[in-house]
Image (cartoon, helix red, strand yellow):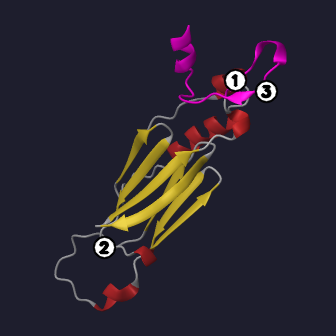
Amino acid sequence: MNRFDLTPYRRSMVGFDRLFDMLENQGRANTGDNYPPFNIEKLGGESYRITLAVAGFKPDDIDITAQQNLLVILGKKSEDAADSQFLHVGIAQRGFERRFELADYVKVRTANLEDGMLVIDLEREAPESMKPKKIAVGGRAPLSVVEGDDTGSDANEAA
């Protein structure tokens, strides 16, 4: 794999250290193991969904840990199948660990395991202090949070 040199960007961009570290660590951590396969989808607004194909795993076999800016999904197969004698093994029986870097203020809402699919719903919740506010000219009215899209499209439509 090609390695990108981010040194010129580190010299000229202040406050992006965490982003550069994530990019460099992702290249090192990507060992080529694609098990279990997964999808990441944006459901709209600030909602996201991660879906992992974990056929053969039970809810007790899966451990999900959400830390600040990190989601770790760990799967450990129970020893129930150790007594079985397989003639052919085509379904993966090994454990796994998947790590997902989360953006600031992204929280895990739900996690469900159904039909061999682990579905984890996420949502970004920016604190009130980070949301855009309308400021009254002359300071007569209090500040109010701008409702709707955070991209500023409301401001563009008004212009």
Foreground: 87 or 15?
A: 15
Q: What residue type is labelled 2?
A: Gly
Residue 67, located in which quarter of the rendered image? bottom right
Disc sitting over residue 30 in the figure: none
The local secondary structure at tag 2 comes to loop
Residue 25, located in which quarter of the rendered image? top right
The outermost residue toward the top is 159
Task: Kindly tell me whether residue 8 is visible in this rendering.
Answer: yes
Foreground: 104 or 157?
A: 157
Q: Which residue is drawn at 62% across and 35% down?
A: 20
Task: Kindly tell me whether residue 33 is visible in this rendering.
Answer: no
Q: What residue type is labelled 1?
A: Met
Nearest to viewer (mark 2 / mark 1)? 2
Disc sitting over residue 142 in the figure: 3
Magenta-colored span? 132-159
Q: Where is residue 141 in the image (x, y as percent from the top left)?
A: 78, 22
Contact (Cβ within 8 Å) of mark 2 with mark 1: no
Q: Which amino acid does label 3 sit on?
A: Pro
Q: Name the residue under label 2.
A: 56
Membership of 150 in magenta stretch: yes
Q: Which residue is drawn at 76% across and 17% down?
A: 136
In-image side of 134 versus 157 (left or right): right
Q: Residue at x 53, y 60 (%)?
A: 72
